[in-house]
């Protein structure tokens, strides 16, 4: 087969993107574990590990630019590179969001909202990222559409979680005896929980982005992009 | 030269070596054939082929080609060596006629008139279908005479000075040579020589301009100039270009035809569709370099 070196580079790009996704999912899983167990050491590992994700992201970006500049790809090859280029951005953002979750864990000193199952929402987002990357690896168009539908369910779960937090806040009695520190701690807890929900919801959005770019890669179908 | 067609050095378009004064039946007949044809919403193709076969002796070079080439667009023909793309190009102005073993069947029409009809004069046809070759081939004459050559041998009336100037301007060469029209065309650089050949080809005011790898012998700067020129020429002419350079086809053409081994036209469509999402796996494999 002609252009063997080029084909090897394309295969390597695909493998490296999948490796990056495993790294990011690992960070996300650790961040959720740290949050559940209030494990500051694990949270710190997640935060420190973000540099590794960023470095890999920059390496893959360079690989994509090199392939575009040096190989002038077209057709399916072009769509693979263009899609991978965009997908690495989504993965890098998921890494940032995992870091956010770890930072919330370091800031938190109590669990104010046991009725919000943040771990269940987190597991859903991990599954969505993994499924999106499986679709990318297997070029599975049906899985791309299914993922977009699941994001609606995630959004609904996040909306309900936020509503629970807000209702809790409204129903919490802040009497005149409450110190300023108590009020500030309450506001921080509410804010932190809302940010956690928002960040997990964004992880789902990035998973959908991966599916959308995968659909484009496989069929040049931009239906899920816009 | 990559195809089955033997390389020839004969001039074409406005450069015919042995011009005659035969009646230009093609023009007369085509005028009749196209009258009233512009009423439809979709313009008729300038060039149309149906079930076009070409044989060199026993060897089939083109296999049942059906294509509609639109007016005032750049149509690129790409494909591996020996796929018949240059053979197809040379069918359009009957450059294959002089190859004894060449046999053409089927239809290839210019504005509705089959160019292989008995009453079509190839010389008249080549006035309407100019051609530019891979290697710049100016005559050993002055720049002016190179451009005016086709006008004179075809007895084209009009102000030749004006036509030469306009042709050189259209070929984006006037500013560089206007002060040296009496100098030999051979003194120009390779890129300038090719633009001179383009000026020579368009001087008789053809409708179609055929280009057989017109930039493959040029450096990147000259290539870029010729590519820009091709896009501009498409405002006035229907351009059909054969190229081995797929990036060039992607850059400059509106339509792309992909010929593959066996003289088969596998896919023809908008250039962006061909290069972003071809319908046929064989085309995908070819343009991505997986074979060929």
Image (cartoon, rainbow, N blue to C red):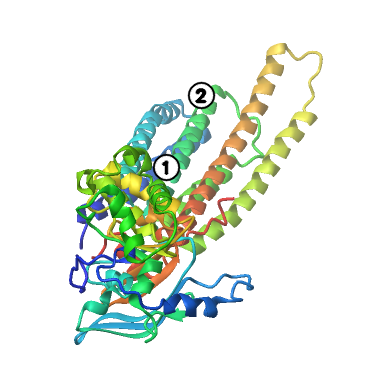
Chain where mark 1 sits: A
Residue positioned 24% across, 58% down in the render: B134
Chain where mark 2 sits: A
Residue positioned 45% across, 66% down in the render: B269
Image location (x, y in percent) of residue B113: 46, 80
User: Label 1 belongs to which residue?
Assistant: A88
Q: Quadrant of the N terminus of chain B?
A: bottom left
Q: Is residue B163 above or below residue A100?
A: below
Image location (x, y in percent) of residue B212: 29, 62
Q: Is residue B37 above or below residue A5?
A: below
Name the front one of labels 1 and 2. 1
Q: Quadrant of the C terminus of chain B?
A: bottom left
Asked whether residue A36 is in view, the answer is yes
Q: Work out whether residue A176 or residue B129 is closer to the camera in this orientation and state it.
A: B129
C-alpha span from label 1 to label 2: 27 Å
Q: Secondary structure at mark 1?
A: helix
Image location (x, y in percent) of residue B56: 21, 82
Q: Is residue B11 above or below residue B228?
A: below
Q: Secondary structure at mark 2?
A: helix
């Amino acid at each position: 087969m002609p252009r063997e070196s080029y084909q090897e580079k394309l295969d390597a790009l695909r493998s490296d993107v999948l490796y990056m996704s495993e790294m990011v999912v690992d960070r996300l899983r650790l961040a959720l574990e740290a949050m559940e167990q209030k494990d500051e050491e694990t949270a710190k590992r997640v935060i420190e590990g973000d540099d590794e994700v960023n470095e890999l992201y920059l390496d893959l970006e360079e690989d994509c630019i090199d392939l575009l500049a040096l190989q002038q790809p077209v057709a399916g090859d072009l769509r693979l590179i263009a899609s991978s280029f965009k997908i690495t951005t989504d993965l890098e953002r998921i890494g940032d969001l995992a870091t956010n979750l770890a930072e919330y864990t370091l800031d938190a000193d109590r669990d104010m909202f046991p009725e919000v199952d943040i771990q269940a929402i987190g597991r859903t987002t991990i599954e969505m990222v993994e499924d999106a990357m499986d679709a990318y690896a297997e070029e599975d168009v049906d899985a791309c559409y299914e993922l977009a539908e699941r994001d609606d369910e995630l959004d609904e779960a996040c909306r309900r979680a936020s509503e629970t937090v807000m209702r809790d806040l409204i129903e919490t009695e802040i009497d005149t005896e409450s110190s300023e520190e108590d009020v500030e701690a309450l506001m921080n807890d509410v804010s932190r929980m809302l940010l956690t929900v928002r960040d997990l919801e964004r992880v789902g959005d990035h998973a959908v982005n991966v599916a959308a770019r995968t659909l484009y890669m496989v069929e040049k179908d931009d239906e899920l992009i816009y | 030269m990559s195809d089955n067609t033997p390389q020839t050095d004969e001039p074409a378009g406005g450069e015919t070596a042995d011009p005659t004064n035969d009646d230009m039946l093609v023009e007369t007949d085509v005028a009749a054939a196209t009258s009233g044809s512009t009423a439809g919403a979709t313009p008729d193709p300038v060039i149309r082929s149906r079930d076009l076969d070409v044989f060199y002796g026993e060897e089939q070079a083109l296999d049942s080609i059906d294509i509609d080439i639109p007016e005032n667009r750049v149509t690129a023909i790409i494909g591996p060596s020996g796929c018949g793309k240059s053979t197809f190009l040379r069918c359009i102005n009957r450059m294959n006629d002089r190859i004894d073993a060449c046999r053409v069947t089927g239809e290839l029409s210019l504005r509705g008139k089959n160019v292989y009809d008995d009453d079509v004069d190839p010389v008249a046809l080549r006035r309407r279908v100019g051609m530019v070759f891979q290697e710049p081939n100016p005559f050993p004459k002055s720049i002016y005479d190179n451009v005016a050559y086709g006008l004179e041998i075809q007895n084209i009336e009009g102000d030749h000075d004006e036509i030469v100037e306009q042709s050189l301007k259209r070929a984006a060469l006037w500013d560089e040579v206007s002060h040296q029209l009496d100098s030999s065309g051979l003194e120009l650089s390779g890129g300038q020589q090719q633009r001179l050949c383009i000026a020579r080809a368009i001087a008789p005011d053809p409708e179609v301009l055929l280009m057989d790898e017109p930039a493959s012998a040029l450096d990147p700067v000259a290539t870029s100039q010729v590519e820009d020129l091709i896009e501009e020429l498409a405002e006035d002419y229907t351009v059909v270009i054969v190229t081995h350079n797929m990036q060039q086809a992607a850059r400059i053409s509106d339509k792309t035809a992909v010929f593959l081994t066996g003289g088969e036209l596998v896919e023809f469509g908008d250039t962006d569709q061909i290069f972003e999402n071809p319908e046929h796996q064989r085309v995908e494999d070819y343009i991505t370099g997986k074979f060929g």
